[in-house]
Image: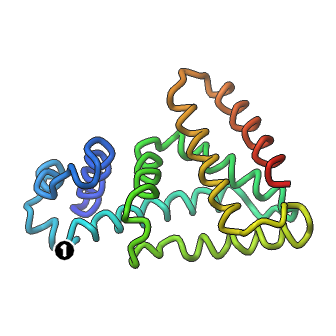
Amino acid sequence: MDKKSAIFEAALRLFVEHGFHGTATSLIAKEAGVANGTLFNYFPTKDELVLGLYAAIKQELTEYVRIHTGNAEDIRDFMRSQFLTSLFWALDNPLKFHFIQQFHTSPYSSMPNASVDAEQTAYHTKIIRAGIKQKMLRNLPVDFIISLVNSHTFGVFQYLQSKKLSKAEQHKLIETSYELLKKMLE
């Protein structure tokens, strides 16, 4: 494993366990098996490490969703596929998804360098606007719809993590939760 990957792996585990402010960079370096100076060569500040890790995880999630979603013509099918695929990825990558949640509820999410979501947000904004225009979605502010979808996704993930359910039971609840979200947005 290269040093940057080792730093990311250690930072992910420690940030989720101890929080951003409760995790010293010296501990991350120690856990990654690198010197403090090496960590700072890759990430001059802890903020840059947090933002870099977030960007890497979001890129991984985005690529996974794009590969597994396809190009559904119907906006409802597309949104369903995006929702289901995101949650399936989250269940397979719980530490990474916890980190995304943690990031979204932290001051880091409003930092100027947090624009990693700009391309993804623009893409979803385009889809949602088309859904509103075609009267498949309620005429609500786009950022509000994105917030509802994100909150719903985070909540379903938290619920599934708190229960001991089979994969089949998880998938059924994910499908049901999407139907509830769809009714709310139509």
Q: Please state which of residues 18 and 57 is positioned toward the viewer in this rendering.
A: 18
The answer to whether residue 110 is above or below residue 64 is below
* Residue type (three-letter) at the residue carrying disc 1: Pro
| Residue occupying the point 27% across, 68% down | 47
Residue marked by disc 1: 44
Residue at the image position 57 percent from the left and 62 percent from the top: 62
Looking at this view, is 32 or 54 the one in front? 54
Question: At x 16% / y 73%, what residue is drawn?
Answer: 41
Residue 81: image location, x then y, percent: 74, 52
Residue 120 in the image: x percent, y percent? 60, 70
> In front here: 163 or 96?
163
43 to the left or right of 162? left
Q: Left or right? Give the position of 8 relative to 174.
A: left
In the image, residue 95 above or below residue 5? above
| Image-quadrant location for residue 20 | bottom left
Task: List x then y, in percent, for residue 37.
Answer: 8, 68
Identify the image quadrant of residue 178. Answer: top right
**Residue at point 40% right, 44% down?**
95
